[in-house]
Image: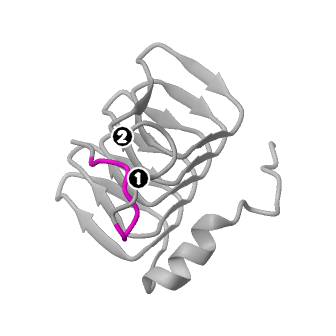
Amino acid sequence: MFTKNRDKHGARAEGPAGSVSMIAMGTTLTGDIESNGDMRIDGNIIGHVYCKARVVLGETGIIQGDLHATNADIFGTVNGNVITKDMLCLKSKSSINGNIQTGKLQIDPSSVFNGQCKMTSEQATQAAGDKKPAYEMQEN
């Protein structure tokens, strides 16, 4: 499911190889999350997610904010924008309510996507994914 944390030259990235941060079903976190390693989210996050590796959003997982990652497999729901540097996979029963910016996109037939999609080169997506948005989310 996850790959070892290695850079493009084969050197080990920060954090122990194979380490995965997990947010379990029934857990709600409020605030932004940053991770250098892989993440598995089955709970509810109210805030932005910044991950320099792979994010797997399980069927019960909900992100109420933007998702920035190198790669992402979405089975759950994102109510916000999704920016991935490399690959974004929208799996069966997934739901995205926001815009997508990615290098590569795979969409299963039963997934739902409401927004605009911009596919860019890895360099352009990487530049966008590395920067945290300058705006604050406004609540109505």
At which x and y percent is residue 1? 21, 42
Q: CB of mark 1 within 8 Å of CB of mark 2?
A: yes
Kind of residue at disc 2: Ala
- Looking at the picture, tell me which residue is in the foreground, 5 or 103: 5
User: Mark 1: which secondary structure?
Assistant: loop
Which residue position holds label 2? Answer: 17
Q: Is residue 53 magenta?
A: no
Q: Position of residue 49 (x, y in %)?
A: 59, 45
Please give the name of the residue rendered at 39% of the width and 59% of the height, measured from the top-left corner.
Answer: 11
- x and y, in percent, of residue 31 in the image: 71, 33
Magenta stretch secondary structure, dominant: loop
Which residue is at 19% across, 58% downward? 108
In this view, the residue in front, 39 or 73, is 39
Q: Residue at x 82, y 49 (%)?
A: 138
> Which residue is at a point 46% across and 13% down the rendered structure image?
26
Q: Is residue 6 left or right of residue 2?
A: right
Q: Is residue 90 left or right of residue 30?
A: left
The tag on residue 12 is: 1
For marks 1 and 2, the one nearer the N-term is: 1
Q: Position of residue 113 (x, y in %)?
A: 38, 59
Magenta-highlighted residues: 3-9
